[in-house]
Amino acid sequence: MNYYLSFDEAGNVSSSLKRNRLVRRDRNFQWIGAVHEYLEVFGNIQSSEIGITHGKDKAYTDRNLQIYLKREQEGKPFTPRDLYYFANELRDNAHFNKSILYYEQFLDGKEGWIEDNIQACLKMGIVMHSLVMRKRESNLYAGLCYTISQELNSAVRWEVIFWRKIIIILRYIGIQKQQIISRTAVT
């Protein structure tokens, strides 16, 4: 089924995904993940043009962040998908430095979905730029990541390997991630 995530000013769908929502109960499919669960299905899958609109009617809470923080504290393992969504929750709740660490951990694992890898690079660049702007400092690495992320936003297709190579090149010339975090720490 189509899962409509957002709409433009005219009410047309601007972002959608395919989701498995109508399944046979006797197949005992399982929901995967502690947060942002997905239904793991297999077998004879039929597509449908039925659309479901994703709408949040409730006020924002930090519920998802609290679930991830508890899992982290308990030492429970994180899947690549969990790492990505935990980084997003940290970012959304203004834990910017920690979000960078989790985006890095996610990307270093090289097991994420291509779409999530691209978004992680984009979001990490924006977070780094934001931290630098808060300190009103010039920082080549964060500025370049932000510029790249803006290009990614307007691009049709990019390979994550390209972004990882940019980071590797920057590290090679002596710009380390730890320098960014220590120079942009928000107290």
Image (cartoon, helix red, strand yellow):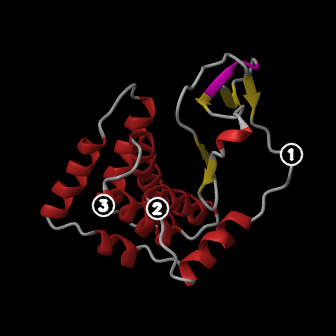
> Which amino acid type is shown beneath numbered disc 1?
Asp
Task: Say which residue appears at 22% left-offset and 66% top-offset.
Answer: 175
**What secondary structure do most residues of the magenta stretch adopt?**
strand
Which one is in front, 34 or 143? 34
Q: What is the magenta range?
A: 11-15
SS class of the residue under badge 2?
loop
Q: How many marks overall? A: 3
Q: Residue furthest front?
A: 26
Is label 1 in contact with label 3 (beta carbons under 8 Å)?
A: no
Left or right of 123, for residue 25: right
Question: Residue 97's x, y, as percent?
Answer: 47, 71
Point out residue 145 in the picture as x, y percentages from the top left corner.
Answer: 34, 51
Q: Quadrant of the N terminus?
A: top right
Residue 73 lies, in percent from the top left, at 56, 83
User: Does the segment drawn in magenta span residue 103?
Assistant: no
Q: Residue at x 20, y 49 (%)?
A: 165
Left or right side of 138 for 14: right
Disc assigned to residue 108: 3
User: Marks 2 and 3, how far apart in space?
Assistant: 13 Å
* Dot 1 or dot 2, earlier in sequence: 1
Tell which circle, 2 or 3, labels the residue nearer the N-terminal end: 2
Mark linked to residue 79: 2
